[in-house]
Amino acid sequence: MISRRGFVTGSLTLFAAPLGAGAQQAATIRTVGILGSRPERSRPFEEGLRERGWVEGKTVRFERRVSIDYRELPRLAKELVQVPVDVIFALYGAGAAMDATRTVPIIAVMGDPVGAGLITSLARPGGNLTGVAIMSTELSGKRLEILTQALPTARRIAVLANPGAQLTKANLHETEARARALGVQLLRFEASAPERFADVLAEVARKRPDALVVLSDPMFTRHSGRLVEAVAPQATGHVRMAGLRRRGRTHGVRSRTRRSIPASCQLRRSRPEGSEACRPSRGAGDEV
């Protein structure tokens, strides 16, 4: 992976030849495949190309394949390769794109490509993958640490993960390592689709954890309102539940104090004497 500036430069370089080709520009239309979870996520990229003279229908054609369901990504990536496309811009599903082709250039925005096993190093990624590494896996352990600071009596913490997500393995590894250092026990639960939220969270409630952490994943972000609705019936007593951010709004359940609570403090059943409740603060919520 390269730096953010290098990513922009590198990605635009893929389209530089037609713009400098003079008379050939009118006759050459490049095809860009877009793989993602939501159509609007690629708009800044498309606008950036348009500002540099790449106009859809005239000099560039976009083939868009989007789905929040990670199980659809391998099929969608193969469709793009079969179109065929000149380059794939993957906002979601870089692994699926790499499985589909080792020759078509792939520009990806993702978490930890090394941890996901897509490249061997950031300095020398090799192959046909480039883009931006957000390194969000490093934040997984930090979220757990912040949770234990907010709830110092929490010793059994449930972790909800999407088993098919590309970064789940790396996020879990980071979270488990931090849990060992903090001396807390993790209870692992998995939900691979929104339809599973209610059943899985009912099982979480039966295990009676002190709190719930939701690992970062586009599916949880997309269906955050549904996730909160599934958590609400399972929470009893003095509930501490945060809103999960979605499209600029916060979905959540208010406690008896009528205050919004940070997202990592989701399933606190009761507040022991002498302990402090999670205090709401700007930016404290865990956006998943």
Image: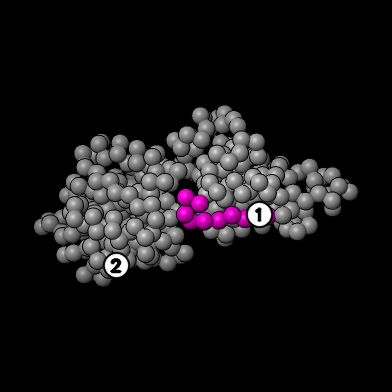
- Which residue has dot 2 on it? 253
User: Where does the N terminus fall, quadrant-wise?
Assistant: top right
Of all residues, the one furthest to the left in this rendering is 273
Side of 31 where 20 appears, left or right: right
Q: Is 127 above or below relative to 199?
A: above
Going from the N terminus, do you reach mark 2 or mark 1 first? 1
Residue 33: tell me if it is visible.
yes
Residue at image position (71%, 41%) is 13
Side of 242 where 84 appears, left or right: right
Q: Is 277 above or below relative to 110?
A: below
What span is in magenta? Answer: 62-72
Marking on residue 145: none
Q: Position of residue 131 (x, y in %)?
A: 58, 41
Marking on residue 63: 1
- Is residue 67 shown in magenta? yes
Residue at image position (55%, 49%) is 75
User: Residue 30 versus residue 176: which sits nearer the camera?
Assistant: 30
User: Residue 84 versus residue 224: which sits nearer the camera?
Assistant: 84
**Under tag 1, what secondary structure?**
strand
